[in-house]
Image: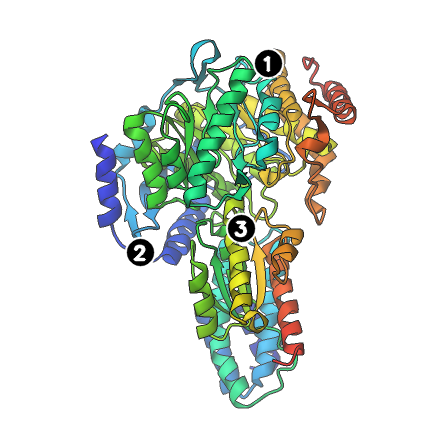
Amino acid sequence: MDTQAMIEDIRKAIIEGDKTATTYATQTALDAGVNALTILNQGLTAGIDEVGDLFEQGEYFLPELMLSGRAMQAGLGLVKPIIEAQNLDQSNDDTGTVVIATIQSDIHDIGKNLVASMLSAGGFTVYDLGVDVPVQTIVAKAKEVKADLIAVSALLTTSQPFMRDLVDILNATGARDQYKVMVGGASVTPEYAEKIGADGTSANAVEAVRLAHRLIHEKHGMGK
Amino acid sequence: MSKYYDLIYRAYHGPMLGEEDWDLEKVAGTTSRLVRKYKLTWDPNQIITDDPGLADTIFAAGLELAKTLGVYSRSTGRVIEFSGDELEEGLRNMPQTLEFGEGKDARTLYARKICDERAPLVWAGSSGSPMPENLFKKAMMSYAQEPIVDMINSFSLTSVNGVEVRTSGPMEIAAVRREMLMARSVLREAGRPGMAVLAAASAVSELGDLAAANPVYMPPTDAHLVPMLNELKMDNGNLSRAVNGIEYGVRNASLPCVIVGGLGGDVPGCAVINVASFILANLVCLADYHLLHPIHVRHVATSTRGVMWVENIVAQAFARNAPAIIVTDSFPKSGAMTRELLYETAATAILSTVSGGHLEGPAAADGAANHSSGLEARLMGEVGKAVTQQRLSLREANEMVLKLLAKYEHIFELPGGNPGLSFDQVYDLETLKPIPAWKAMYDEVKVELREMGLTALH
């Protein structure tokens, strides 16, 4: 099987959300000596980009996103250690580690789950802490896993103040510069995000992933 | 009610399962299988269907889903399972009439039929929208003063005495009680002291719900929400809301906001989940009636094609197979002082009225801001009445909804939505009348609706 065919198998497996097939196709390509970065960019990432497009077009729905996210993580688990061990050029890598949660007092998680799935599918390492997560727990987890980005959501207007607490705590402990902070939820506006000192918000999950990439790019550009 | 305590026992002793396995393998997997088994499809140009067989099939698939899965307790990580007999008994016991409110302001909700000739009741207001304390009474009065309104919704207070309200804390208790005292005050001033309220909008957790359970705030002739979580899930907070109503007696409104494009996949799968949710809500929410409120995975609004199709088919499915009191929640994308809000309101009112629902809302601008007013609720009620007076058929209603969609569907592509203006910008706060430009827009849209064929609209 030539390289292009192996790459195509990986891309298809991601689009089909088939974790087993992704693992098999990725390992097959690695065993055949295909460059890990080529597998990442032309196979895994190309596939997941198409999944995002299909979701945006209304062809794919939440289950497909979640399944492709699982498949992507399986593929990344094989290629990322090699890329890091071989010190391959990752200057274009705008992914990173994300701690995500529905903020303290709010139990609504579908938007948060969508964003978590899409970030995971987009190559980010995602720690999803669930719903109604105390602000201190989020900050502690971000510190523990050396997160690049903290993403929190609230559907309820009366839960939004806890988002402001998060930014306040980061400021008060001198940790604000270590993390980018994204906020989201049906009633969160760009004005609100700016007002509380977050780095941004987005109208939907697809835009959230774009924003995350942009923020990571900015963070890396700041000389992390 | 000992059955409910048995249900709580099951929540602590049912089979254990990881939440992601519930989501993907149980809900998404089983729904997908049922959609294939029953060969379910939808036509984006048949938003209001005239296909009794399809409604019956959706009901059968939803019942099978409910029997197969049960409900997941997020608090315990266990599945609350039900036998088919229990679910069918729950369907048989669904109230067919239910009185709300007191005295001359009392109203009786009833299970409506498809193309029912009786006008739907109007439960008006932007339920749960955030509202500053200083505008609360005036905004609520804009609904209470409308003669066409039968029952009323309330707003979530964002502050009390200038102190920010936070969920699940002391200020939620304060907000709930202040909200309900102000609501009762508004109803007395409007000369409608016995009008029922969907209470309390500031009770976003069970703490607030408990705080409202006193006749001074939420008399037993009001309704309160007992929501389900997405999809087919409960937690101890929402079970507590149901328990709160057991001895107290307040009406339980089940609220499963099934996400169209979520775990159910495409539109038909989400309709199946919505049917299953109502069937299960009879038991886990102790539902007296059901709020039909699917939402769109990206646009939220209830006025997208897919969401409207779900509303139509679920209401018809119950009207044909297990008559229930269903109230359709209208959450348009657009806000006050936009023509699109009026088109969206009219479309959802037409759909609900012919499909077998009562009318609730509209919560303009997705209910995310105080961009609603009594004027669009007036239109909602007027359209519902006109539809029944004219005896609009399902096919005629569909044609009208398609015409309205052509007028507003572009808003879903607007980057910032179509939020319009806030209540205080569209109403004169002294006279509590809509500003002339907003009233003129309402008058013009009514002319358009008559020209579209809704000739009974006065």
Circle 1: residue type: Pro
Residue A8 visible to an observer of this rendering: no
Q: Which residue is mark 3?
A: A160
> Quick one: label 2, few (<14), some, or many (20+) residues within 10 Å?
some
Scheme of image coloration:
rainbow
Q: Residue at x 74, y 23 (%)?
A: B439
- Quarter of the N terminus of chain B within the rendering: top left
Q: Which residue is mark 1?
A: B147
Secondary structure category for the residue under label 1: loop
Q: Residue at x 75, y 26 (%)?
A: B438
Q: Nearer the viewer, residue A199 or B166?
A: B166
Q: Which one is closest to the eye, mark 1 or mark 2?
A: 1
Q: Which residue is mark 2?
A: B17
Provide the chain ID for the residue under circle 1. Answer: B
Q: CA distance from mark 1 to mark 3?
A: 36 Å
Please state if A80 lies on the left or on the right of B142 as rendered: left
> Quick one: label 3, few (<14), some, or many (20+) residues within 10 Å?
many
Q: Residue at x 28, y 36 (%)?
A: B84
Pinpoint residue A94: horizontal percent, then vertical percent.
Answer: 62, 74
Provide the chain ID for the residue under circle 3. Answer: A
Q: Quadrant of residue A47?
A: bottom right
Q: Nearer the viewer, residue A123 or B74?
A: B74
Residue B238 visible to an observer of this rendering: yes
> Quick one: label 1, few (<14), some, or many (20+) residues within 10 Å?
few
